[in-house]
Image (spheres, grey):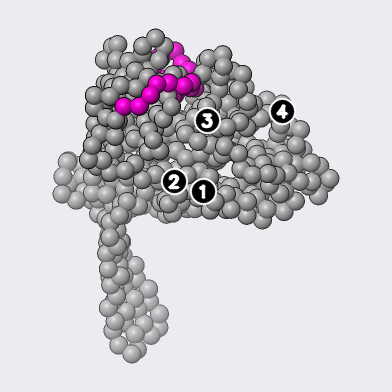
Amino acid sequence: MRRPFQRLLAGPFGAIALTLSVAMFPCATAADDNPLAKPNPLAKEDPLASADPFAGRFRSEDMEVVIENVGGRYSGEIRFRGESYRFEARRTDPKLAGRFTAGESSFDFEAAIQDGKLRLESGGATYLLSKVGGEAGEKGDSGDGDGKAPRKSRLFEKGKVYKHHLGFTFRHPDDWTLEEDRTLGLIRMTPPGSKVGPSGPEELYLISGVPAPGIEKVDDPRAIRFLDESVTSHLPFLRRTGEPKPIASGKGPGLLLVYEGTDPAGRRVRARLRGCLIEGFGVTFAAVGLEQTIESRDRDVQEMFETFGYAEAEKDEKLVGAWSSESFQTVKSVESSLALTTKSTIVLRKDGTFARADRTLGIADTRSGDYAIDTGGKKAAMDGRWSTTRGELYLVWNDGSFSQYRYHVQGRAGSRELLLTWGRDKKELWTEVR
């Protein structure tokens, strides 16, 4: 049961597919030496303030460090001289002790707050980075500037926190309502006072994401071309105005595309599409509606965009391992028959990735003779990511489709059974592979 991710903006402005087809980052360069062990100068300025002095974004001349604290677990990213390194850390007051990955190697580091700056030490080198935010940040633009540093958003003090089952997180104003549509794979945001006309809402705000295999930068021309074609094919009266603009996001560089036009009813319509890359997914935040209304909401939308981040998705450890299943099918006609057996294996890894292989064997009995069928076993590759929440299993495939099941595990370790169900009465029984 695989369904495509669909990104639809419905209502008086028609339907518009908004999928940012961009892909997983390769994990920096292979490193025989610690890349941070080569010192560099001191600090500039940076974003994302919070009560936790370590949480936020810190920047120096050629280094940027983003630190997230989710339930006392620290993680984030070090960006250094054009490369990015993921890390995890723990608090050992008054310091953070962590380890980052560079290629196939990993290295230790320590971080402390010194005179309001982040002091990071690794491989004998020391770096001082300033935290982005504060009064200077409050005076920044609404996201149409150089795209380097978000402002200190009011949402970090007062906003509600949303966490998607895949790990995507952001904050939104208390008076905006949120609706998650898992069938379409998107999040609909509704601001206070939003008007609904005879044909539907006059403004729409949708957040969506899709796996991103192949593109490393959010401004890749292929992604921009795809978005342009999607917008104009579904809303032919809209045209992009100007070049894509770099903007601040909560997770690295972001991009803003603006489209304008006059709809068949003679109204001025504007669409503002923000995009960024988060943990191998391309994520878009689309605002489309009457021009004046969309502009009046733009500060709220940008501030939400600046809180986009990632916390580890939930994964039920009972599902980690290899599972196998068999299904049978027989088709008969007056002069022939076909019997098929499909053998499937799925591996759910602890890191949240999965691989599935299917092999179909069969015998066809026809008037001209008997024939054997063997599709061969597809090689197990990293086919996507999995997560669980409230008794449901989600598989997000690298091609952008997804599968959703209710699950139940029973039996003893080594010989357990996994029952997957979906729809009204569709079931699959999987057996643990030793």
Q: How far apart are marks 3 and 2 (CA)?
A: 17 Å
- Residue at 27%, 49% (x, y): give it: 347
Q: In this view, does 227 lie above or below 91?
A: below
18 vs 359, left or right, is: right
- Residue at 38%, 24% (x, y): give it: 41
- Tell us which disc is closer to us: 3 or 2: 3
Kindly identify the amino acid type of the residue bearing the numbered disc 3. Answer: Lys
- Tell us which disc is closer to us: 3 or 4: 3
Q: Do the residues labelled 4 and 2 touch (CB within 8 Å)?
A: no
The first of marks 3 and 2 along the sequence is 3
Q: Where is residue 413 in the image (x, y as percent from the top left)?
A: 17, 41
- In the image, which residues are magenta? 39-59
Q: Name the residue under label 2.
A: 216
Query: Magenta span has 290?
Result: no
Q: Mark 1 points at which residue?
A: 220
Kindly identify the amino acid type of the residue bearing the numbered disc 4. Answer: Ser
Q: What element carries label 2?
A: loop
Q: Which of 197 and 151 is in front in this view?
A: 151
**Residue at far top of view:** 115
The first of marks 1 and 3 along the sequence is 3
